[in-house]
Image (cartoon, coloured by chain):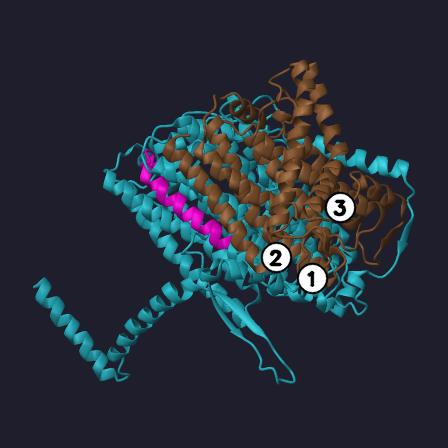
Chain colours: A brown, B cyan
Amino acid sequence: MSASGIAAQFTELALAVLLAPLLTGWVNQCRAWLQNKSAPPLLQPYRTLAKLFSKEVVLAPNASPLFRAAPYLIFGCLALAAAIVPTLGTDLPLNAAADAIALVGLLALARLFISLAGMDIGTAFGTLGARREMLVGFLAEPALLMVLFTASLISHSTSLSTIVETLAHREFVIYPSLAFAGVAFTMVSLAENARIPVDNPATHLELTMIHEAMILEYSGRHLAMMEWAASLKLFVYSCMGLALFLPFGVAQGGDWLGIVLALPVLIAKLAAGGAALALIETMSAKMRIFRAPEFLGTAFLLAVLAMLVNQMLGS
Amino acid sequence: MTSLSSLDAALLLAAAWLAIGFAGMVAPRSLRLASRVLFPAGAIVGLLLAAVALQATFATPSTRVLALGLPDLPFHARMDALSAFFLLLLGGVAAGVSTFAAGYLRADEGAPPGLHCLCYHAFLASMALVLVADDAYFFMVAWETMALSSYFLVMSEHRRAEVRRAGYLYLLIAHLGALCILLCFGALQGGTGDYTFATMRIVQEAPEWATVAFLLALAGFGAKAGIVPLHIWLPEAHPVAPSPVSALLSAVMLKIAVYGMLRVTLDLIGFPVWWWGVIALALGLVSALFGIVFAAVQTDMKRLLAYSSIENIGLVMAGFGLTLLFRGFGMGTLAALALTATLYHCLNHAFFKSLLFLATGSVLHATHERSLGRLGGLIHRMPWVAWCALIGTVAIAGLPPLNGFVSEWLLLQAFLFTPGLPQPYLNMLVPVAAAVVALAVALSGYVMVKFYGIVFLGQPRDAKLAEARDAGLWERTGLMWLAASCMALGLAPATIIGLLDPITRAFTGYGMASLAQGWLFLAPIEPQRASYSPVLFFVGAALMIAVAWLSVRLFYHGRVRRSPAWDCGYPFLNSRMQDSAEGFGQPVKVVFQPAFRIEGHAPSPFDARPRYSESAEDRLWYWLYLPVARGAERVTALVTVLQRGRISVYLMYSFATLLVLLFFVR
């Protein structure tokens, strides 16, 4: 654990928390351009957050303490997740504390709390959202774990730093298993971040919504935390995808210059990733909710296939 | 304590449990005696037993011949690290459950308190004796005492037909299992005629006899542990028992069966063959997935937990299978890792499952309702129970930083080493089997959200829930002991792995403790490969949450207005609009449709009083159990040919028998 490692750790965390709404704004802007609409300003998510924070909280009479604590719990879990994924450097102090499996556990913990919060008021939409979220979760979580396992089998480690170091330092070989895993990961992250084709972040149409249904009863600062946490989740998944499949530019070990140089590379990669996400969302149609298990089942099978390919070809 | 060995202490404490049980019969109808004196005393004995076991873990194995048993066949007892570990589990869980039971017991429910006290403590004592038994005779006596005492406990409310049915099924499968275990010991003694475990350890059976013994042990102990397809009694018997008993059955008795399996395979046989591991692994994975898929569609909260026990035992079996697999190929370090995961999961499941079963007990007493469809919103009426149950929920869903995650993490790490197996196909297929574990764990999150959300959150689904009262002091203490244990097991894994070190050293030749990186980090094999530090993780998460909360509090006003729920502007909100237990389980029912036998009834559109019904049943009933039952009925029907009801016919049978015997004896 070096001084540069600690600096990288804190920069990474601060960057994730502060830039997450910007990534959401960027994706929304790209999507509006692609759909021939006039785009909202890039900083719109920050304005929304500022507005929500200053509004008062309207609580249902039967909201329990769990309901009020959940936004902070979920935000905290996702902030920790953002700190675990190596984005700038690989010499992170928190890396010994949590590996890839713990990261998946952390995301699952956030999901558990958001679902419980959705069920807390006891409205029709809240429980509906919670059930659908858990449906998406129980198929997406093992798929994500299998994607990470494929990468772990290549690098002989579940530590995210080691995975990134191994994958970034190989000579340019195409790993067939990683290709399968990449497709599976893309499908999982679309589902987990409530994106088209599984969910639509821009709708409150009750028959289709998942994420929005769960947070329907939130308002004021609680809603702000939930929205921020959702942006953070998108940021974490983007960084995870970049770390696994495009790990170039991440500083190795305690290298000050590397960390400084990694920052613009990261921002460029995120901008490209966000544009790609907007493109996928524009080009696909929202599926019926009953098709979501098929979509996620495919992702799960692809991830398992990635592992099998890795075993058979040894790469 | 100089003259008293830990084995003697354990035997004395088991005797103390028996004495407490019989003391209950002094005044069988007195609730005060049982609940204020005897059950608290039983809890203290449990704590003492845990302390003794803790001390015995690092001691050298000690043996003793007891002055009990048949004239020429005395009981042998032995305490080694494996026994000590399971005694620790038994003592620790029993302390919490007995404390809870002290507040749970009611005079007007089921058996009289004194009788209940006797069966309960006999059950505890017999489990302790199974763990220290060192010959087949003592083992079987203790094993059968355990089966019978638990049968009487399950039958506490024998006036209900479903309880009698469940009890009968339990007894039947328990005896089939006991028969297999008896035959297994027969195969293990290897023709010496000596049934002490000491001889069985030395005797080298022929490989085919070792295989026979393993398969018999798998069937016998598997029947007790609830491995698919011998699980059928478990979801019937566990829910109908009083909640503390359900807790003991699920949390401890299933682990005693796991102990038996480990004892026979790793200790008495001693040289496992790799393909045994494949069988155990396959059975474990099937049980895990089967159990959790069925748990997702249950509508009775205790049945849901019982099915989740099948899942957890499946995970334990998968770990056991990996142990055998690695051991069979002589990969000692990895076998030690898999064995550590197996034992750790046993310990974890014992604590979180008893916690949840006891929470359902409190809910049951407060509401007189077991059906999920009539509960809801209890976090407001029963906050203590609800918060303790939340800890159990997070733990059983396998989420960090609680204990369920640690053992699942270890198990997945063990799976990640399987590509190194020196056998083509196996080294490709076994890693993929990790996907099944991942799926089962993710599904358990689904099931636990259903359980917790429907019981404790939302609006009350029934008017009578408004009168529900929180658990009393005794019940609360028991719940908090178990919840605190779940936290401790989650946060201090390196310490627990230190406890497991003598066991893995004895059975695989390698320990895990030397590989742990201090108390803070958990790093099996080597730290570059994987490490996890629950304390740092917990502190990190707590810090993030605290900073988020404090900064929001610091910078923004705390104005809150109470107003009816928004629900997309729909004004006529009532509790029936929430998801029912059936509704919440529906997606799983659709995704895993082939697993169920679904029978539904939908009303016609013109029905004025429409009633919907749907049941999802276990196909194994129809494929395996009912055909066997029908066959048995047909065979027994043949006996009626002999039964004529006339004395002259029976005399003729005797005469014919004598004639035949005369012919043989001559």
Q: Which residue is mark 3?
A: A70
Q: Which residue is mark 1?
A: B365
Label 2 Cα crowd, 10 Å radius (few <14 / some 14-19 / many 20+) = many
Cα separation, mark 1 vs mark 3, equals: 29 Å
Q: Which span of residues is magenta-colored? A: B268-292
Is disc 3 placed on a helix, strand or loop? Answer: helix
Is disc 1 placed on a helix, strand or loop? Answer: helix
Q: Indicate whether A25 appears above or below B370.
A: above
Q: Indicate whether A245 appears above or below B661.
A: above
Q: Position of residue B211 (x, y in %)?
A: 28, 42
Do dots 3 and 2 share one subunit?
no
- Residue B454 seen by the camera: no
Side of B552 relative to A261 (left or right): right
> The residue under label 2 is which amino acid type?
Ser
Side of B174 relative to B576 (left or right): left
Magenta-span inclusion, residue B290:
yes
> The residue under label 3 is which amino acid type?
Ala
Q: Position of residue B559 (x, y in %)?
A: 92, 48
The residue at the point 69 percent across, 59 percent down is A127
Label 1 Cα crowd, 10 Å radius (few <14 / some 14-19 / many 20+) = some
The residue at the point 73 percent across, 24 percent down is A11
Q: Which residue is mark 2?
A: B243
Image quadrant in which you'd find residue B46: top right
The nearer-to-camera label among 3 and 2 is 3
- Residue A279 seen by the camera: yes
- Circles 1 and 3 in contact, beta carbons < 8 Å: no
Is disc 2 placed on a helix, strand or loop? Answer: helix
